[in-house]
Image (cartoon, helix red, strand yellow):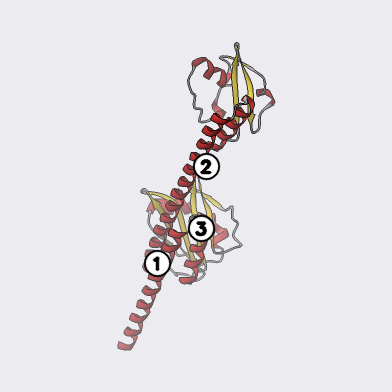
Amino acid sequence: AMVEALENADRKAQRKLMETELYLEVASIAGMTPEIKEALGVIVNTVAEKLALDVSAVFLLNSEKNAFCLEACNKKEVPSNLCFPIDSDVSKKVLEALKPVVVDDASEMPDIENICKGLGSLVLTPVVRDNACRGILILGKYEDGGFGKDEADSSAIIAHTISTAVRNTELYEALNKQLKQINIVYELSKAITSVYEPEGLLKTIAEDAAKLINAKGCIIRLIEGDMLAIKYSYGPLDKEKEAALPIGMGVAGWVAKEGRSLLIEDITKMPED
């Protein structure tokens, strides 16, 4: 009995050591890889290998689709565009608990059949940031009852590290965007002081203004009498919008008449006139 107890203790110690090495490796990946897809791709493969898992996948919240969409999975045959709605059974289980949920029968999860097909058990873990679920980590095994409290605790630590990786990526992208905007503003101000030909100046302003806010296009209209004429446009332009506008008509006409800016968050809700 003593020998058996020592062997059990040794196995537990070896597992704890392996888990600690895994956490350090995942944390290193999260801190050193700025591209989120690349970071998550390495993380899911590392987790699957170290923990001897058959499935390791990360879904992140896509606000536009109102769903959790696949970002990385160790199974290459899983469709890269796989998503499941926020009101699906998978989402509800995780969102209601907001902690690791062990699923002993993977067939209960039809929403993620492409991932859990053939699996015996799963653990679903929320990726939490700012007290809200921003993603779901899914770990699976072909064997039934393959997950216990220790595995659930491990998944929570991994999910926390994934949350950190997502946050690091957002900060990295925000910094890059700011640097890009600063450079565009600098180039624009330089053009204003160095370009003396009006058409060339308007072209530079329109193109740089669109790039500054990642817009698809930009139209510059100038007041000529009681009309607003297009002097330069960048990007796609509807034929109907090419004509001059009377001051007071349309969005541009309203801005010219009122002399102030107008923010439109949803153009589909605008009146036709």
Q: Which residue is mark 3?
A: 109
- The quadrant in which residue 268 appears is top right
State how far apart marks 1 and 2 are (Cα).
34 Å
Which one is in front in this view, the residue at disc 1 or the one at disc 2? 1
- The quadrant in which residue 209 appears is top right
Q: Nearer the viewer, residue 256 or 16?
A: 256
**Circle 1: residue type:** Leu
Q: Position of residue 271 (x, y in %)?
A: 56, 21
Q: Residue, x 45% and y 62% (percent of image)?
A: 29
Q: Is residue 193 visible?
A: yes
Say above or below: 123 vs 182. Answer: below
State how far apart marks 2 and 3 are (Cα).
23 Å
Answer few, some or many: residues within 10 Å of disc 3's Cα (few below 14, many 20 plus, some between 14 and 19). Answer: some
- The quadrant in which residue 243 appears is top right
Q: Quadrant of the C terminus?
A: top right
Q: Which residue is mark 2?
A: 64
In the rendered view, does 21 fall on the left or right side of 79? left
Q: Position of residue 234 (x, y in %)?
A: 63, 32
Asked which secondary structure carries label 3, the reply is loop
Which one is in front in this view, the residue at disc 3 or the one at disc 1? 1
Say above or below: 54 vs 223. Answer: below
Asked which secondary structure carries label 1, the reply is helix
Q: Position of residue 73 (x, y in %)?
A: 54, 61
**Circle 3: residue type:** Met
Asked which secondary structure carries label 2, the reply is loop
Q: Which tag, 2 or 3, sits closer to the chain's start?
A: 2
Q: Nearer the viewer, residue 186 or 242?
A: 186
Q: Is residue 1 visible?
A: no
Q: Quadrant of the N terminus?
A: bottom left
Residue ranking furthest to the right: 239
Q: Which residue is mark 1?
A: 24
